[in-house]
Image (spheres, rainbow, N blue to C red):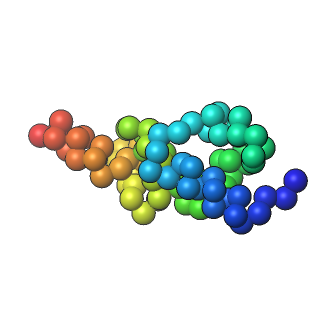
Amino acid sequence: MSISEAQKAEVAYYFEGSCNSVDAFEDDPDIPLTDDQVTDILLEKEIEMCSGCGWWLHQADLEEVDGEVLCTDCREDEEEVAE
């Protein structure tokens, strides 16, 4: 099954700015995709999950810190704990 750009955009919209799970999206009857397909779309659309809070954000809003990909809020929390 070929995945249209509109479907890819819907996947990106579903995840970005949320803490939705890949498993939950797999159950969507409108766009039947496997976990691997969803993960590939998220990588293509540059959307990743923050290791700290579990929210999905655009890669530009994330930064790698000590091997973890963190959002601004989680980076600030880590900095406060380190102080």
Tell me which residue sits at (71%, 66%) in the image: 5
Tell me which residue sits at (50%, 52%) in the image: 16
- Depth check: 2 or 72 in front? 2
Tell me which residue sits at (22%, 47%) in the image: 76
Extreme residue in the left direction: 83
Residue 70 left/right relative to 75: right
Where residue 28 sits in the image (x, y, percent)? 70, 40
Looking at the image, is 78 positioned above or below residue 2?
A: above
For the C terminus, give its image quadrant. Answer: top left
Where residue 78 sits in the image (x, y, percent)? 24, 40
> Is any part of residue 67 visible from this angle?
no
Q: Quadrant of residue 79?
A: top left
Looking at the image, is 37 positioned above or below residue 60?
A: above
Tell me which residue sits at (56%, 55%) in the image: 13
Where residue 22 sits in the image (x, y, percent)? 62, 38
- Depth check: 9 or 30 in front? 30
Residue 52 left/right relative to 10: left
Where residue 36 sits in the image (x, y, percent)? 72, 44
